[in-house]
Image (cartoon, grey):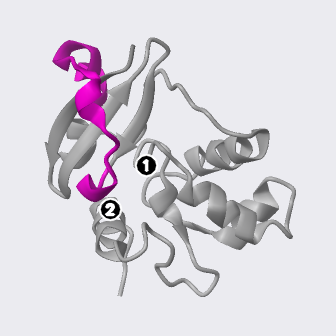
Amino acid sequence: MLKYDIYDAPIGRILVIVSKKGVCRVELFEENWPAYHSLQRDEIACREVINQLSEYFAGKRKIFDLSLDIQGTDFRKQVWKSLSDIPYGKTLSYKQVAEKIGNPKAVRAVGQANKANLLPIIIPCHRVIGNNGKLVGFAGDKIDVKRYLLKHEGFLID
């Protein structure tokens, strides 16, 4: 059974969902939350995820150390692994991610994998920017959250 808790972060309330295998969803925007009320609220099961998110927002954590329950195609998992390798405070372009996974023509597919990431912040999709250095492609009109996360990590943005 899936379990959830809600974390009050500096960017707003975050829904955390865990399975027996690990954290399977981190939802940053309430309008996108699934029907979580059918799940069991369990602060203890979600405690480590929320502790690590709290440490991240407090500037005390740069790398997450959690069991993950990742669902997706092999290609998406490859992209998400590559995103996880982007260091704290650094960025790559969608093109650079495509090149890094050995598929330089897959820029759009990388963007779609980024969009499908159910573990934002933990798998840092906010660290992927446009080839021109612009902040693009973060939950539609939520670029302000991407900007906040990158500034929080010390990445200088004009």
Label annotation for residue 120 = 1
* Left or right, residue 155 beside residue 42: right
Q: Is residue 13 above or below residue 69?
A: below
Residue at image coords 30%, 52% = 28
Q: In the rendered view of the protein, which quadrant contains the N terminus?
A: top left
Q: Is residue 133 above or below residue 145?
A: below
Query: Is 96 rendered above or below residue 135?
Result: above
Local packing at callout 2 (Cα closer than 10 Å; few below 14, some 14-19, many 20+) is many
Q: Nearer the viewer, residue 14 or 9?
A: 14
Look at label 1 and name its amino acid.
Answer: Pro
Q: In the depicted view, which residue is nearer to us: 95 or 14?
A: 14
- Which badge, 2 or 1, is on the more N-terminal residue? 1
Is residue 50 visible to us here? Answer: no
Span colored in magenta? 28-50
Name the amino acid, label 2.
Leu
Question: Residue visible at 42% across and 66% down?
Answer: 139
User: For this view, does 28 lie left or right of residue 77?
Assistant: left
Query: Does 142 appear in magenta?
Result: no
> In front: 98, or 26?
26
Q: Residues within 10 Å of mark 1 (few under 14, many from 20)?
A: some
User: Which residue is tagged 2?
Assistant: 149
Name the side, left or right, on which 45 lies relative to 87.
Answer: left
Report x, y in % for residue 103. Answer: 86, 60
**Residue 57, percent from left and from top:** 22, 48
User: Could you say which quadrant of the image residue 14 lies in?
Assistant: top left
Q: Nearer the viewer, mark 2 or mark 1?
A: 1
